[in-house]
Amino acid sequence: MLRIDLAEVIRTPGMRQVYEINEPPYEDEDVEYVSPVTGRIAVTNTGTMLLVRGPIRTVIAERCSRCLADIRVPIQADLEEDFDLKVIEDPAHHDKSVQVVEEEIGRVFDGKVLQMDVLIRQAALLAAPLQPLCRESCPGIPVQPSPEDEAREFHNSPFRDLSRYFEKNQD
């Protein structure tokens, strides 16, 4: 999806570049974006680190954790990522190159190209509620026992006599 070539920013210490993000809705491996993904991302080379900062906004599709209804959850997240930069000297060509150092797990760079969709997915998943609700008073999935279940449970219930007592006193 959204890829930003940062070769010039990585090569130039002190450089800061701002990128506007305005991606149409799309479906990723873990997240379905139902509104455009928008934001303004600043990438800064400090000489030793590459800083990626900025807010993103979107709406994602989720399921209510109580009733399992499809819902839309607005997401507002601030990207705050730091990547170490390593200078590599090439003695054969009397040249230096700068590389981004990152862990093997959760890689967001492909060479010097930043894969923004990976960062956006991570931010959206972290900003999404753990148990999204369609509404605060959602009662959940209604459970309707069959007549056989009710008869069997009532027949074996130790509260059967107590239930009859309350039914008589309510009249």
Image (cartoon, rainbow, N blue to C red):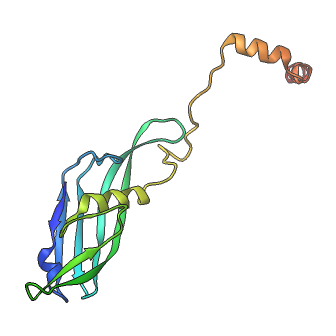
Q: Quadrant of the C terminus?
A: top right
- Farthest residue to the front: give it: 92
Q: 29 or 87: which is nearer to us? A: 87
Q: Is residue 3 above or below residue 10?
A: above
Q: Quadrant of the N terminus?
A: bottom left
In the image, is 139 to the left or to the right of 158? left
Residue 63's x, y, as percent? 44, 40
Q: 22 or 162: which is nearer to us? A: 22
Residue 14's x, y, as percent? 19, 89
Q: Please report the residue visible at 19 percent of the width from the left and 63 percent of the height from the top.
A: 21
In the image, is 166 to the left or to the right of 110? right
In the image, is 57 to the left or to the right of 168? left
- Quarter of the figure with residue 162: top right
- Quarter of the figure with residue 141: top right
Q: Please report the residue visible at 85 percent of the width from the left and 21 percent of the height from the top.
A: 157
Q: Please report the residue visible at 11 percent of the width from the left and 78 percent of the height from the top.
A: 8
Residue 122's x, y, as percent? 36, 59
Q: Is residue 60 above or below residue 22?
A: above
Q: 104 or 38: which is nearer to us? A: 104
Q: How many marks?
A: 0
- Quarter of the figure with residue 116: bottom left
- Farthest residue to the left: give it: 93
Q: Is residue 126 above or below residue 16?
A: above
In the image, is 64 to the left or to the right of 21? right
Residue 13's x, y, as percent? 19, 88
Q: 118 or 131: which is nearer to us? A: 118
